[in-house]
Amino acid sequence: MLKGDYPEHDMNKVFDMVYQTIEAGGTDDKCKDEADFLMHLFAGLPAEAVEYGMMFIHGKTDLPAAAQEIMPLYVRLMNLLEYCEKVESLRTIPETMSTEDIMARSDVISSLEGHEKFFGTPLMGFQMNAASGEVGKAEAEETSEEGEDKGRLLLMNSQAAVFACEDPLKTALFYETKLGFSAAHLDDEAMPHIKLTRDNIAIILVKASGDITRPAREFGIKYDMYIYCSEPYLMQNEIIGNELKIVEALPDAKEAQKMNTNRQFVFEDCDGRHICVSQYIERY
């Protein structure tokens, strides 16, 4: 969701705002190429299609069917505008910041890469030649199971497990002190919650009562969460050192060779949930 004060019917002014952010510094090297690319594509649209883009910027998503074919362009522009807003928000550093402020700022910085990875990628069959600054048809690329999404704007960037807890504060403290997570208390959102983060893992804690707070195994599901880990042995040692309950220990290397499942171990959290830590094997 954009927070900037954008004009109602002037796409040129929208791009002027983008270029002002770029000129002020702090953006990725490809940001200007991305802005040039998108502006070129918008310049080739009929006035009605550009107006639909302005409506999309201002939160109107139920656009006519005629606009659906160029929806990727509108989404890509939103990606660029959100990126510029985040860069602008980082320019001012308050004299004093609370722990929550520091964590929020860190989250913004970490999220920039998610926007930057689309800069310069093909869109709707077109791409920009960085050397000449000209826009032309995108070159055909060989696709594979791993690379079939290359060049497409992925709208889903990350995910988080949701744990319903009778006492979210107690659970948050456990994950902070025993498992090295950082906690952010988010009371200003539609669903007040505590967000736990560590490495690439995010967990949302919400307050609840009744059956929903009981461990999944009581309903026939073995684990409450999977965590894929590049080296579970190190993770298990850390957990044992913090005196957590190990439900299933990690098998040794020889034993694991005879198994038809990944090497994994299971620990129990303060609410009785069983968390499975499974070895992540990168596939080339």
Image (cartoon, rainbow, N blue to C red):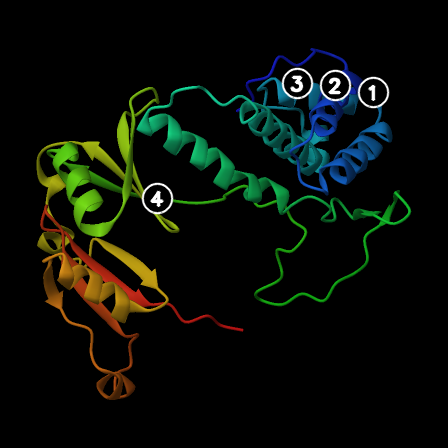
- Mark 3 residue type: Met
- Mark 1 residue type: Ala
Whole-Å distance between the Cαs marked 3 and 1? 12 Å
Whole-Å distance between the Cαs marked 4 and 2? 35 Å
Whole-Å distance between the Cαs marked 3 and 2? 6 Å
Residue 213, how many percent across, how many down? Answer: 13, 40
Q: Residues within 10 Å of mark 2 (few under 14, many from 20)?
A: some
Which mark is first along the chain, 2 or 4?
2
Relative height, residue 116 to residue 68 (above, below): below
Disc ID at residue 51 = 2
Q: Which residue is mark 1?
A: 47
Q: Which residue is mark 3?
A: 55
Residue 221, how many percent across, how many down? Answer: 17, 57
**Residue displayed at 65% across by 49% down:** 152
Q: Are marks 1 and 2 in contact (CB under 8 Å)?
A: yes
User: Is residue 222 in view from this perspective?
Assistant: no
Residue 270, how many percent across, how many down? Answer: 10, 47
Which mark is first along the chain, 1 or 3?
1
Q: Which residue is mark 4?
A: 160
- Mark 2 residue type: Glu
Foreground of the two, 184 or 76: 184
Q: Nearer the viewer, mark 4 or mark 2?
A: 4
Foreground of the two, 139 or 2: 2
Q: Are marks 4 and 1 in contact (CB under 8 Å)?
A: no
Which mark is first along the chain, 4 or 3?
3
Say what secondary structure mark 2 lies in. Answer: helix
Q: Are marks 3 and 2 in contact (CB under 8 Å)?
A: yes
Say what secondary structure mark 3 lies in. Answer: helix
Q: In the image, is 229 to the left or to the right of 168?
A: right
Q: Residues within 10 Å of mark 3 (few under 14, many from 20)?
A: some
Residue 178, how many percent across, how many down? Answer: 17, 50
Say what secondary structure mark 1 lies in. Answer: helix
